[in-house]
Amino acid sequence: MVQNISGSNGGEELVSIMTDQDGAMRSAIAQIFPNTNHRNCVFHIKYKAELKYGRCLDKEDRREDLHDIIDNSLTKEEFETLWQHMIRKHEIQHIKYLQYIYETRDRWAPVWFKQEFYPFINTTSRSERTNSRYKRNVGPQYSITSFLKEYERIQDTIYDNKAQADHETNIKKRSKLWSNYCIEQQAQAYNLKIFKKFQWQLR
């Protein structure tokens, strides 16, 4: 998958490209667009970690530590320091995939791309998460009828979760505003769960 984030007309080079970890694609992009910012999709990095070592990551707070370092490190130095601390703390030096992605961290970790133009990353991640959810529940042996039933079941679950979140918002007190920013006041239109996530990001 190539995500053409930003380009311009008139034959000028792309500004940014996002792909999975395919080596042949990386080599081709380097030759065709040598001045383009090329990064790997962080969703695929996390997804492969879950796929390969999900059970191992379930122990203690390993998953939380991993995601926190990836998503919230503010500097490269902080990322590297916390990563090494996580490896020692959980004694997971033996996981080769974690060794590999650490060695290639400058290709995918968000903190290495803070100065580059990569909008719509969350939108892409949402679609990827939806795809992976269906892949987990629907196999190639399914008939069209079975697929549609499973699709409806998953959709119903999503709608039920949203309805539950909306209900809790209506019966609970509104969260206190953290700041005087108008944008925080406007965000109160969201349900309580989403609003708390927004507040955390705002802080």
Image (spheres, rainbow, N blue to C red):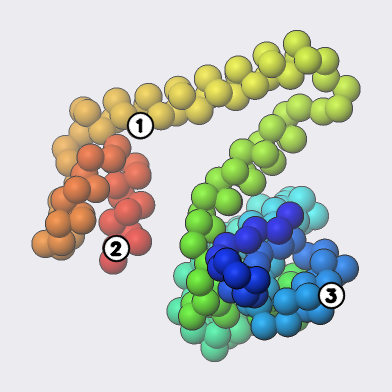
Residue denoted by label 1: 165
Q: Quadrant of residue 63?
A: bottom right
Choose mark 1 or mark 2, whichever is in front. 2
First along the sequence among labels 1 and 2: 1
- The residue shown at (69%, 32%) is 134
Inter-mark Cα distance, 1 to 2:
21 Å
Q: Give the quadrant of residue 177.
A: bottom left
Position of the C terminus by quadrant: bottom left
Q: Which residue is drawn at the image coordinates 78% and 65% (left, top)?
A: 21
- Mark 1, residues whose alpha carbon is within 10 Å: few (<14), some, or many (≥20)? some
For marks 3 and 1, the one nearer the N-term is 3
User: Would residue 106 be seen by someone viewing this image from the given angle?
Assistant: yes
Which mark's residue is nearer the viewer, 3 or 1? 3
Q: Label 2: how many residues lie within 10 Å, few (<14), some (14-19) or many (20+)?
A: few
* Residue 18 figure quarter: bottom right
In the rendered image, residue 139, in percent from the top left (x then y), is placed at 82, 28
Q: Nearer the viewer, residue 178 or 38?
A: 38
- C-alpha gap between disc 3 and disc 1: 46 Å
Q: Which badge, 3 or 2, comes first in the chain's sequence? A: 3
Q: Residue 15: horizontal and vertical position, in percent?
A: 59, 73
Q: Mark 3 falls on what kind of element?
A: helix
Q: Name the residue that disc number 2 marks.
A: 202
Q: Secondary structure at mark 1?
A: helix
User: Residue 119: x and y, percent?
Assistant: 49, 62
User: Dot 3 corresponds to which residue?
Assistant: 27
Answer yes or no: is residue 102 visible.
Answer: no
- Quarter that holds the N terminus: bottom right
Residue at x 35% of width, y 44% of height: 194
Q: Are marks 3 and 2 in contact (CB under 8 Å)?
A: no
Q: Amino acid at mark 3?
A: Ser
